[in-house]
Image (spheres, grey):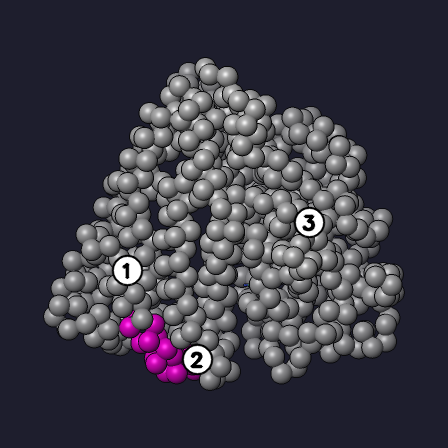
Amino acid sequence: MKKLTLLTLLALLSLLPAAADEGMWLPSLIAERIGDMRAKGFRLTAEDIYSINRASMKDAVVLFDGGCTGELVSAEGLLLTNHHCGYDAIQRHSTVEHDYLTDGFWARTREEELPNRDLNVRFLVRMEEVTDRLAAGETPEEIIAAACAEGTGYKASVEQMYYGDQQFLFVYEQFDDVRLVAAPPSSIGKFGGDTDNWIWPRHTGDFSLFRIYASKDNKPAPYSPDNVPYRPKKHFTISTKGVKEGDFTMIYGFPGNTQEYILSDAVEYIAERSDPAKIAIRDGRLEIISRAQESDPALRIHYAAKHAAIANAWKKWQGEALGLTRMKTLETKRQQEELFRRENPRGGELLDAMKAEYRRITTPYFAREITLETLRALPAKYSDEERAEEVFAARAKIERALFRRLFGEYARRCPAEYRVPAFLDGVARSGSPEAFAEEVFEEVWAGGDTPLSDSLRSGTKRMLDHITWLLGTDRLRNLTSSRLNDLYREYVHELRHTWPERPFYPDANLTLRVAYGTIAGYEYADGEYHKPQTTLDGIIAKDNPEIYDYDIPQSLRDLYASKEYGRWASEIDGRRTVPVCFLATNHTTGGNSGSPVLNADGELIGINFDRTWRSTMSDIAFDPSICRNIAVDIRYVLFVIDRVGGAGHLLREMKLK
Ligand code: ARG
Ligand code: GLU
């Protein structure tokens, strides 16, 4: 191979991961990073993070409800996660008489802790590379079956790292009796609502408490009143000493999905085609729903969860597209590809094959995304439960407007060759997408027979199946195909072996990872510096009984007035106050919600719950100067439990330092 010039080498170093605090590392391989972690201030060992021989930090971290993270904070199975991760459970227990979403919930005794159907947590028992076993002919099914047989409640999966260049077995112990212990009122747990979501400065007390129950011999068991609190191998000590800029932080959790090694073709697709289209479609939906919410308090409540779900990704995509443009990721990736072409003997051939595959699949994949955002975002029917609700009649206008809007968007945006024939027929017959939308809406709204909507739905399903067939895979979280995955396996393999001195980390795939960094503010633009810590004073400044998202509980106003913060008081910037949220440089993504934020001694200092929207391109390209995760300061969590919830008995279970 040609010798690298110093210049190309330098260019390359800036193009490849992972410098600074970028990276989501596999816990079983953390020894490879421990030197860097210790240089940044970490005081523990690789064995403290992950060990199969003795209790380690991994034994205090759980995959919560299949999509969030949680952490154990007591010897009796007490677990912390986000309010928004416990939201479903809290909502399901809420009635008009006991509105735990609005008022909060604090179990005073173990008997008051509330069981939850369909809620589980998983501990990682161990992970191990099985690339060689698979190459030797064992199937993933055989490997998984053998692992599941190892213990009660064991689950297992084989996951691809680096597009399958390496494969790992993950063995989990799953507990299904997980009870709700406490949740603050939404005016704390969801303070700032969708307005503040993805935003810094932030003042959300985004936490809730659950407890894992087990059989008397401490094994997973289905719900039973005879179950007892689970005794974990390990739980986190909580540090109440506080944080300051520059302190080491580590996040241990289950990040869901990143695509750090994609070619410029995929970046271009995301930044210029997919994100803008999806944002515009959701603009329309949000406008219709928000207007309805403003017109009627009953509609505001009814559409709250829907609005939050639509707005969450909508805001994230805006940050992502903005961030990719700001970082010039497209140009950078193109340069990287040029270098790879020159420096790697197989480079040109490989890239050409990948680019050809992108040309083949990008339009059908886009059609799929548009279909999911439009036709598939509309209800196929309204349940009897919904029909019985008082707001149902008032919803007709809004639902009709959504049908009209989304049919119009589908007609305009779905690439012609992937439009559903039943849709085209309907539009031709009725005169316009909107007129056809009205016809389908009338049927769905009326219930009963729905021939138009049924044929539209089955036509849509056939089209989506066709696209899946074109892509050769139904594992479609990103623009990809089965052939492209094979090509990426080679590509990333070559990257890693051509430049072995560079650290690489596998893309997030909802397996357990370690991210580390420091507490840090950021300067977004000249003169625009953001401090890394917020306080109770900021909550009071935002407090407004007139605005739903900023209407804090009276008890919090009273506490502020009396300044009776007790042991949770802290001196910040010369003021005596209570810390609320902080920023750090850890590389996180969706799924890291609820993750423990740990200090240099592995003690809990916060709970991760968000990133700034301007960081969300870190799923594709991480910019250490501005990418920040957002955590709720553990001292605010303790303050709320103690002073707002009056649940000091829970603190006595915890190990506070
Ligand atoms: N943005 C965070 C995440 O991606 C929090 C979402 C929940 N909060 C909300 N206001 N919608 O999940
Ligand atoms: N709120 C996200 C979650 O639920 C975490 C924010 C992010 O995407 O980093 O997982």
Q: Tell whether 4 sits left or right of 467.
A: right
Whether residues under marks 1 and 3 lie with C-beta atoms below 8 angstroms apart, the answer is no
Residue picked out by circle 2: 292
- Residue 277 appears in which quarter of the rendering? bottom left
Residue at image x 41%, y 68%?
A: 283
In space, the residues marked 1 and 3 are separated at their CA atoms by 39 Å
Q: Which mark is residue 584?
A: 3
| Whether residue 287 can be seen here | yes
Q: Earlier in the sequence, mark 2 or mark 3?
A: 2
Q: Which mark is nearer the camera, 2 or 3?
A: 3
Q: Which residue is nearer to you in this view: 20 or 418?
A: 20
**Residue 169's spot in the image, x, y percent?**
51, 29
The kind of secondary structure element at disc 2 is: helix
Residue at image x 37%, y 83%?
A: 393
Q: Is residue 403 magenta?
A: yes
In space, the residues marked 2 and 1 are separated at their CA atoms by 26 Å
| Whether residue 173 can be seen here | no
Q: Tell whether 350 sits left or right of 104.
A: left
Q: Which residues are magenta?
A: 389-404
Q: Which mark is nearer the camera, 2 or 1?
A: 1
Residue type at tag 3: Ala
Q: Is residue 15 magenta?
A: no
Q: Earlier in the sequence, mark 2 or mark 1?
A: 2
Q: Which mark is residue 413?
A: 1
Q: Which residue is nearer to you in this view: 521 or 629?
A: 521
